[in-house]
Image (tube, rainbow, N blue to C red):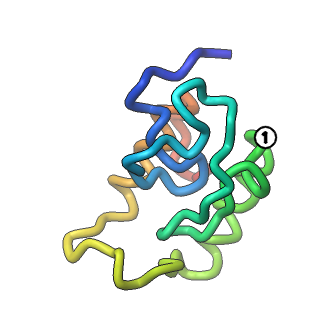
Amino acid sequence: MTVPNETELHFCRVCGLYHDDPPYGHSGKVPSFEICVCCGVEFGYEDTTADAAEHYRKRWIENGTNWFDPSAKPRSWSLEAQLEKVRKATGSSEKSSL
């Protein structure tokens, strides 16, 4: 298992959205239990394992990648660019798995 760098700690484990405060703290181990404004995952509850995060991600994608808080969605938002953050953090090279 690789140790995430400081920048990777700021991305949602499910959708890859950047958060000013790391969802799992600066240690990467203490969840904030906040809700991601993009995918709606609760940090520390629905994303505690890689399998759980993948399951939530697949469900979010199957349901149309709707934003939990649509007012937070950037005008130039790109699903592929955002999911690339998850690929880099997990080391996944398979686009279909995301």
Query: In the image, is residue 64 above or below residue 88?
Result: below
Toward which corner of the image does residue 29 lie, by quadrant?
A: top right
Q: Which residue is mark 1?
A: 49
Query: In the image, is residue 82 above or below residue 77?
Result: above
Q: Nearer the viewer, residue 64 or 32?
A: 32
Toward which corner of the image does residue 51 lie, by quadrant?
A: top right
Instruction: Where is residue 97? Give x, y as percent.
Output: 62, 49
Mark 1, residues whose alpha carbon is within 10 Å: few (<14), some, or many (≥20)? few
- Residue at (34%, 75%) from the top-left corner? 73
- Looking at the rendered image, the quarter that the N terminus falls into is top right
Instruction: Where is residue 38? Give x, y as percent.
Output: 48, 69
Toward the left, the furthest residue is: 76
Instruction: Where is residue 13? Give x, y as percent.
Output: 59, 46
- Residue at (45%, 21%) from the top-left corner? 5
- Residue at (39%, 64%) from the top-left corner? 79
Drawn side of residue 68 relative to residue 56, left or right: left
Drawn side of residue 82 relative to residue 36, left or right: left
Instruction: Where is residue 45? Give x, y as percent.
Output: 78, 55
Q: Label 1, secondary structure: give it.
A: loop
Drawn side of residue 13 relative to residue 67, left or right: right
